[in-house]
Image: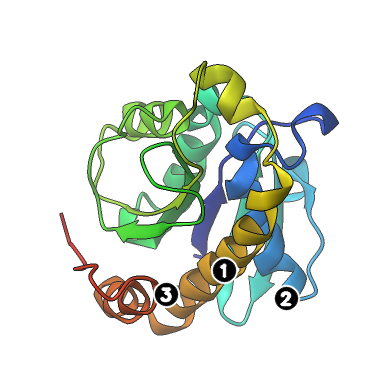
Amino acid sequence: MPLLVIGLGNPGPEYLLSRHNVGFEVVERLALREGLLFEPGAQLKGYDGPTDFEFARAHVPDVLFVRPQTFMNRSGDVVGPLVAWNGGELSSLLVVYDDLDLDVGVLRIRAGGSHGGQNGMRSIIGKLEADRFARLRVGIGRPQTDAVRHVLGRFPAEDRDRMDEAVARAADAIWDWIVGGDLSKTMSRFHSRWNLDAKPSLE
């Protein structure tokens, strides 16, 4: 069965390139590198669960890049059934998403932990009834005013270049995990590149 790389976001053109959709951007970058196109969830062979998602599949190595097409706070409605279809192996799952608690463009990988207030992760952890799966957080910075308006808004020009670089670096790290299969080594390798003071954590 494939590895599952889930990028979180909201569907629809009005949310394109919003802060909340950086997870989509990362999986799109990975698919583009491999020359893959996204298909409707109903086209996934052998899968008979909810199909509110788009996917792109590479076969060498075998990995499924997924963009849930539910809204963010219902991400678990897609991820839960996909994980079950994939044999329930949480070690084969990585979720990439935006994080308010990290500065713009800062990246962190963890092997587990709480949802940290991120509604997509709250939904996924609730559906899986487990939090021991890999995740890569992409910093979008703290809001100056309303948090909802902040996450649904787009990056200002001065942050967009930094975010484009972060998306590319996030894709590099995820691909390293895909081909290497060792999250702890990926964490050590990439955290040291991103921040010389960062100490990788397997919490």
Q: Amino acid at mark 1?
A: Ala
Task: Residue under label 2, please give it.
Answer: 33
For residue 174, side relative to residue 51 (left or right): left
Q: CA distance from mark 1 to mark 2?
A: 9 Å
Q: Quadrant of residue 187?
A: bottom left
Amino acid on which disc 3 is placed: Trp
Q: Residues within 10 Å of mark 2 (few under 14, many from 20)?
A: few
Residue 101 position in % (x across, y down): 36, 39
Which label sits on residue 52? Answer: none
Left or right: where 52 falls relative to 106: right
What residue is at 72 percent from the left and 75 percent from the top? 33
How many numbered discs sit on the rendered protein? 3
Circle 3 residue: 177
Using a 10 Å C-alpha cutoff, classify the residue at mark 1 as few (fewer than 14 neighbours), some (14 to 19) or many (20 or more): many
Q: Is residue 46 visible?
A: no
Q: Which mark is residue 171?
A: 1
Q: Looking at the picture, how far across and down is residue 72, in whole percent?
A: 56, 28
Label 3: element kind: helix
Which of the two residues, 78 or 138, is positioned nearer the viewer here? Answer: 138
Query: What residue is drawn where x is 61% and y is 67%?
Result: 165
Which comes before the other along the chain, label 3 or label 2? Answer: 2
- The kind of secondary structure element at disc 1 is helix
Q: Are marks 3 and 1 in contact (CB under 8 Å)?
A: no
Q: Which residue type carries mark 2? A: Arg
Spot occupied by residue 34 in the image (x, y as percentages of width and height): 73, 76
Residue under the point 71% across and 58% down: 28
Image coordinates for residue 22, horizontal then vertical, percent: 61, 47
